[in-house]
Image: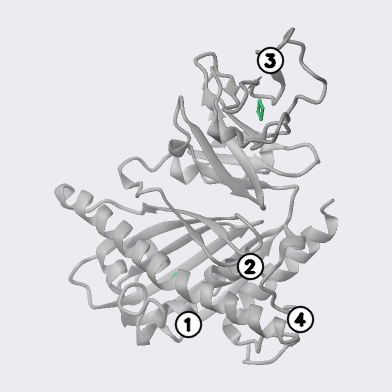
């Protein structure tokens, strides 16, 4: 695809709150972050949600406000019987959001004393939440079973918040040409700029590929392949499912060799809007192979996690926050922003089209 200025990606906006998909599964948290006996609070699509494990061990998600005087429920207590007790005047709620105990007066529970509850499913070590009004179908959760089957190849589960709308972050991940510049010396270098780019769609699932032959191998890929390898063929295949669920199959092999002879890792990238201008980023990794020397694996795992955190938190995050602020300022000046599109935008363009179709059908 040649460089061009096609305008069909749509204008960019620093505030896309009206464009959140609602009838879909969002990643609320890693399962490990919703510990038994504790209360976990998080803002999702701009709404404060309180999570806790019911007596059965299943995760419950309620709107984080009490229907009496609207105190946040996450300031309350999780009782031994699995009920959530408001910290202000002591109303108690079950996992479905029903008030089941009023400690005052004759104990009668007013009809309005209930809290909205959200459907939740725990799968692949992830807490998924459904924020829409349609029936929540667990079959629609994208396949991240790779996380369950990984064993020792599983990396560290991590989470940061980007000061950027989910569209900025998704576009960042579907156009990995930025690694040669923003992540130079970690994930890319001058030799990884030129690439063969491919876009493939299966239903509403998108695959974006970047391939390079005979290039200097970036440090993170040497870690997962051969520490002393200088040049190789690189591949990156990003799978995207709405709204922001991605797996990146990436690695390196000897020039001209098959991918089965090489190695690399699967990068897990899970995006959920916190607000219109901030995004939860859950990330992890799964290596293709362990090292020939077993004792090196813990050190390699720690180094992969460290480098990825530097790249995402120290490099991507400030760039996207600055990008969003620039767009906000330009919009405030009344400018209509249409990106000057490049060949590397083929993936983001297709993403935009799929999302627009899904949003049009969402109600
Ligand atoms: S605000 Fe919760 S019981 Fe009063
Ligand atoms: Fe990046």
Q: Is residue 150 above or below residue 162?
A: above
- Select label 4 or label 2 by which is in front: 2
272 or 77: nearer the viewer: 77
Q: Is residue 174 left or right of residue 222?
A: right
Dot 2, crowdedness within 10 Å: few (<14), some or many (≥20)? many
Residue on which the image places disc 2: 167
Element assignment for label 4 = loop
For the point 59% across and 82% down, the residue is 326
* Of marks 4 and 3, the one in the foreground: 3
Mark earlier in primary sequence (4, 3): 4
Q: Position of residue 359 (x, y in %)?
A: 79, 59
Q: Residue at x 71, y 48 (%)?
A: 24
Which tag is nearer the camera, tag 2 or tag 3? 3
How far, Cα to Cα, is label 4 from label 1? 23 Å
Q: Which mark is residue 8?
A: 4
Query: Any atom of ligand 2 within 8 Å of the CB at mark 4?
Result: no
Which one is in front, 313 or 92?
A: 92
Q: Which residue is mark 1?
A: 195
Q: Which residue is mark 3?
A: 102
Count neighbours of disc 3 (C-alpha within 10 A) and say few if under 14, some if 14 to 19, many if 20 or more: some
Secondary structure category for the residue under label 3: loop
Between marks 2 and 1, how big is the CA–CA gap? 24 Å
Q: Label 2 vs label 3: CA separation?
A: 44 Å
Q: Position of residue 86 (x, y in %)?
A: 60, 26
User: What is the tally of numbered marks visible in this picture?
Assistant: 4
SS type, badge 1:
loop
- Whether residue 24 is visible, yes or no, is yes
Name the image colouring.
Answer: one colour
C-alpha distance separating marks 4 and 3: 56 Å
Mark 1, Cα crowd under 10 Å, few <14 / some 14-19 / many 20+, is some
């Amino acid at each position: 695809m040649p460089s061009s200025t096609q305008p069909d990606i749509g204008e960019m906006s620093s505030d896309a709150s009206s464009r959140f998909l609602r009838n879909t599964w969002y990643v609320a948290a890693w399962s490990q972050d919703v510990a038994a006996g504790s209360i976990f609070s998080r803002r999702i699509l701009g709404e404060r949600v309180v999570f806790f494990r019911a007596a059965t061990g299943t995760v419950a998600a309620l709107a984080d406000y009490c229907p009496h005087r609207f105190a946040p429920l996450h300031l309350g207590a999780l009782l031994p019987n699995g009920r959530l007790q408001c910290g202000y005047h002591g109303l108690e709620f079950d996992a479905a959001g029903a008030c089941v105990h009023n400690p005052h007066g004759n104990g009668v529970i007013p009809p309005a004393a209930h809290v909205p509850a959200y459907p939740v499913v725990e799968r692949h070590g992830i807490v998924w939440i459904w924020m829409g009004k349609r029936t929540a179908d667990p079959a629609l959760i994208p396949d991240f079973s790779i996380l369950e089957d990984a064993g020792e190849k599983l990396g560290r589960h991590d989470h940061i918040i980007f000061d950027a709308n989910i569209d900025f972050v998704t576009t960042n991940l579907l156009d990995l040409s930025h690694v040669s510049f923003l992540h130079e010396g970690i994930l890319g270098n001058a030799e990884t700029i030129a690439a063969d780019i491919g876009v493939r769609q299966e239903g509403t699932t998108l695959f974006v590929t970047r391939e390079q032959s005979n290039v200097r191998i970036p440090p993170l890929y040497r870690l997962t392949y051969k520490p002393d390898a200088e040049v190789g063929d690189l591949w990156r295949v990003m799978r995207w499912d709405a709204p922001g669920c991605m797996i990146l199959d990436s690695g390196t092999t000897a020039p001209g060799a098959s991918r089965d002879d090489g190695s690399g890792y699967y990068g897990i990238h899970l995006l959920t809007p916190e607000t219109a201008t901030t995004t939860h980023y859950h990330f992890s990794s799964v290596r293709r192979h362990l090292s020939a020397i077993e004792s090196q694996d813990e050190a390699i795992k720690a180094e992969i996690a460290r480098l990825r955190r530097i790249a995402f938190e120290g490099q991507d995050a400030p760039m996207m926050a600055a990008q969003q602020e620039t767009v906000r300022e330009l919009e405030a000046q009344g400018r209509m922003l249409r990106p000057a599109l490049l060949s590397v935008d083929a993936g983001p363009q297709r993403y935009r089209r799929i999302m627009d179709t899904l949003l049009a059908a969402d109600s």
